[in-house]
Amino acid sequence: MPIKHIVKSYDEDLGLLKSKLLEMGSEVLDQISKATQALLERDGGLAELVIVSDQKVNVCQQEVEELGVRILATRSPVAQDLRVVIAGLKMASELERIADYAANIARHTPDLHHQLDLDQPAAAIMQMAEQAKAMLMDILEAFANGDVRNAIAVWHRDDHIDSVYADLLSDLRARMTEDSENIKSYTGLIFIGRCCERIGDHITNIAENVHYIKHGKTYIDGNVPLA
């Protein structure tokens, strides 16, 4: 349960930090959705919109950083309050990187040959993207509710994205060997798959920060605590 402070504006500042992070997370979710839709439909116009909209996330990150610094300078937070600010600044950075990867997916959409049958690799990428979106939604909810157990569950789900990516990489390398004329499309898909895999990694970093807020420690060397 959040600690109530004597100075009401202190609680308001912490609440605002939390709401800005959730707003930023919502914007990042939208970016992933639009980027993968652009990929699936090979829609260059939508891809360009994702690239341009990345600036919104950058602005959100700047607002979080400015607020976090102001809280540190004027409130001198300690204990869990301090961890909320520190974790919030880190989470904003992770969300900004996720948005960058979404924009990179959009940037590589034009590399895909429109006549090439890419149904199987595209399906694998969409599977990774949908898993990442579900993980991001759940970790934002875990952050909003201070739910460490759910954060840990999200952390474990990244293994599925890694597995799908490994299979995708093997498939695309085989296609490149057999069909050298479409190297650019296959290379673009490998890069897009890598973006999805990295998105999953950044979401696990957010999960670690949710754990840090509650317990004052993150996961070490991949050893995930159970509570």
Image: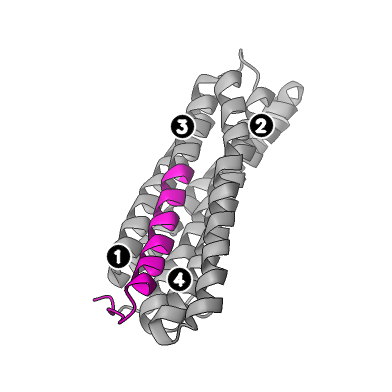
Q: Secondary structure at mark 3?
A: helix
Q: Quadrant of residue 148?
A: bottom left
In the depicted structure, whether residue 6 falls above or below residue 125? below
Q: Position of residue 183 (x, y in %)?
A: 74, 28
State the CA–CA distance, disc 3 to disc 4: 29 Å
In the depicted structure, whether residue 22 falls above or below residue 205? above
State the CA–CA distance, disc 4 to disc 1: 11 Å
Q: Nearer the viewer, residue 141 or 223?
A: 141
Q: Residue at x 61, y 15 (%)?
A: 114
Q: How is the image coloured?
A: one colour
Q: Label 2: which residue? A: 108
State the CA–CA distance, disc 2 to disc 3: 16 Å
Q: Residues within 10 Å of mark 3 (few under 14, many from 20)?
A: few
Q: Earlier in the sequence, mark 2 or mark 1?
A: 2
Q: Position of residue 91 (x, y in %)?
A: 50, 63
Q: Amino acid at mark 3?
A: Ala
State the CA–CA distance, disc 2 to disc 1: 33 Å
Q: Position of residue 170 (x, y in %)?
A: 60, 43
Q: Nearer the viewer, residue 77 or 6?
A: 6
Dots 2, 3 in contact, CB < 8 A = no
Q: Quadrant of the C terminus?
A: bottom left
Q: For residue 150, which numbered disc appears in the image? A: 1
Examine the structure image and report whether residue 14 is included in the region drawn in magenta.
yes
Q: Is residue 30 visible?
A: yes
Q: For residue 123, which numbered disc appears in the image? A: 3
- Residue range corresponding to the magenta coloring: 1-28
State the CA–CA distance, disc 4 to disc 2: 30 Å
Q: Label 4: which residue? A: 208
Q: Nearer the viewer, residue 70 or 82?
A: 70
Examine the structure image and report whether residue 197 is included in the region drawn in magenta.
no
Q: Amino acid at mark 4?
A: Glu
Q: Secondary structure at mark 2?
A: helix
